[in-house]
């Protein structure tokens, strides 16, 4: 069972792709604020419009940036 507050992240875009730097900053801001967890690639994260490779990229970035801190 999950407990705490989880933030559903948006997926920022730039030049027709994921803006990795902006996405990492969104994650860092949430971690610094003490969030319990993050939700990447939900409906707020534009999952229906992302290619499979973009979904994988966003998940990899989120896992690496959060680095077990939330």
Image: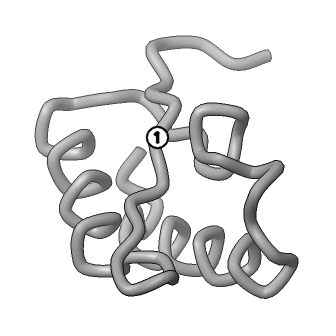
Residue at figure coordinates x 44%, y 28% from the top left = 7
Give above or below for 39 relative to 16.
above
Q: Is mark 1 on a helix, strand or loop?
A: loop
6 horizontally vs 43: left or right: left
User: Quadrant of the image for the N terminus?
Assistant: top right
User: Quadrant of the image for the C terminus?
Assistant: top left
Task: Tell me where residue 49 appears, x and y as whole percent.
Answer: 76, 57
27 horizontally vs 50: left or right: left
Toward which corner of the image does residue 34 lie, by quadrant?
top left
Q: Residues within 10 Å of mark 1 (few under 14, many from 20)?
A: many
Q: For the view shown, which residue lies furthest in the front direction?
A: 15
In depth, the one of 36 and 46 nearer the eye is 46
Task: Tell me where residue 27 appears, x and y as whole percent.
Answer: 31, 54
Numbered label tally = 1
In depth, the one of 14 and 66 nearer the eye is 14
Give above or below for 34 relative to 65.
above
Task: Tell me where residue 65 appears, x and y as whole percent.
Answer: 37, 72
In depth, the one of 19 and 35 nearer the eye is 19
Please name the residue that numbered disc 1 is placed on.
9
Residue at figure coordinates x 25%, y 45% from the top left = 31
Q: Which colour scheme is used?
A: one colour
49 horizontally vs 66: left or right: right
Task: Tell me where residue 40 appears, x and y as whole percent.
Answer: 59, 49
Residue at figure coordinates x 63%, y 83% from the top left = 57
Residue at figure coordinates x 70%, y 39% from the top left = 42
Give above or below for 38 relative to 25.
above
């Amino acid at each position: 069972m999950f407990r705490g507050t989880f933030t559903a992240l948006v997926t920022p875009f730039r030049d027709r792709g994921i803006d990795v730097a902006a996405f990492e900053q969104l994650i860092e801001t949430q971690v610094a604020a003490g969030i319990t967890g993050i939700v990447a690639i939900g409906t707020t994260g534009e999952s229906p419009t992302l290619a499979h490779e973009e979904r994988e990229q966003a998940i990899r970035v989120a896992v690496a940036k959060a680095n077990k801190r939330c």
